């Protein structure tokens, strides 16, 4: 499947007023160019879904926060085999971040959380799942 459009979504995470924007491929045809006016390239990264399942929500919050804030996917589904670019506001300064992922067709008890990720050292986070061992993991690049 070839993706020809990029959807830009802005979400306000309630913890500390962090603004996070992300882009995700869609299957609609369009020729719009996306311009990111504000971003923190040190924290920006790509999530690649190679789990075999579709992802319904992604929450990203500073590790020292007690609040996940809003789902950055805002109702979009990250299909298996697709990827999403996570672009941070320049005022995002936390060193360590937590990421929670929820799956289409599964309840909150099946969500997977990765804690204390140094996003300044990660360009791509590939999510994988092994059905035989029932293990989900993330490969960092």
Image (tube, rainbow, N blue to C red):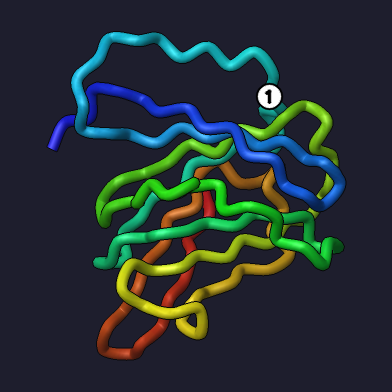
> In the picture provided, is 89 more to the left or to the right than 28?
right
Which residue occupies the foreground of this view, 123 or 40? 40
Above or below, 108 against 66 in this view is below
Q: Residues within 10 Å of mark 1 (few under 14, many from 20)?
A: some
Question: Within the image, what quadrant is residue 134 found in?
Answer: bottom left
Instruction: Please give the residue where the numbered disc 1 appears in the rendered image.
Output: 39
Above or below, 83 against 3 in this view is below
Count of picture labels? 1
> In the picture provided, is 108 more to the left or to the right than 7?
right
> In the picture provided, is 125 more to the left or to the right than 122?
left
Query: In the rendering, at what x and y percent does residue 82 appear?
Result: 30, 46
Question: Within the image, what quadrant is residue 100 found in?
Answer: bottom right
Above or below, 23 against 80 in this view is above
Q: Residue at x 67, y 34 (%)?
A: 88
Which residue occupies the foreground of this view, 21 or 48? 21
Q: Residue at x 13, y 38 (%)?
A: 1
Query: In the rendering, at what x and y percent does residue 7 appear?
Result: 40, 28
Above or below, 23 against 99 in this view is above
Name the element at disc 1: loop
Q: Residue at x 82, y 52 (%)?
A: 15
- Residue with the most extreme bottom position: 133
> In the picture provided, is 49 more to the left or to the right than 121?
left
Q: Residue at x 72, y 47 (%)?
A: 13
Query: In the rendering, at what x and y percent does residue 14 appear?
Result: 78, 49
């Amino acid at each position: 499947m070839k993706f020809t459009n990029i959807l830009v979504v802005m979400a306000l995470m309630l913890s500390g007023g962090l603004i996070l924007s992300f882009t995700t491929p869609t299957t609609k045809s369009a020729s719009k160019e996306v311009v990111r006016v504000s971003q923190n390239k040190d924290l920006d990264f790509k999530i690649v879904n190679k789990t075999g399942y579709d992802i319904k929500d992604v929450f990203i919050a500073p590790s020292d926060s007690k609040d996940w804030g809003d789902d950055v996917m805002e109702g979009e589904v990250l299909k298996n085999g697709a990827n999403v670019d996570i672009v941070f506001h320049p005022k995002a300064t936390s060193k360590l971040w937590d990421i929670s992922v929820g799956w289409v067709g599964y309840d909150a008890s099946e969500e997977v959380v990765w804690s204390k990720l140094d996003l300044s050292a990660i360009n791509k986070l590939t999510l994988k799942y092994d059905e035989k061992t029932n293990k989900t993991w993330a490969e960092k690049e």
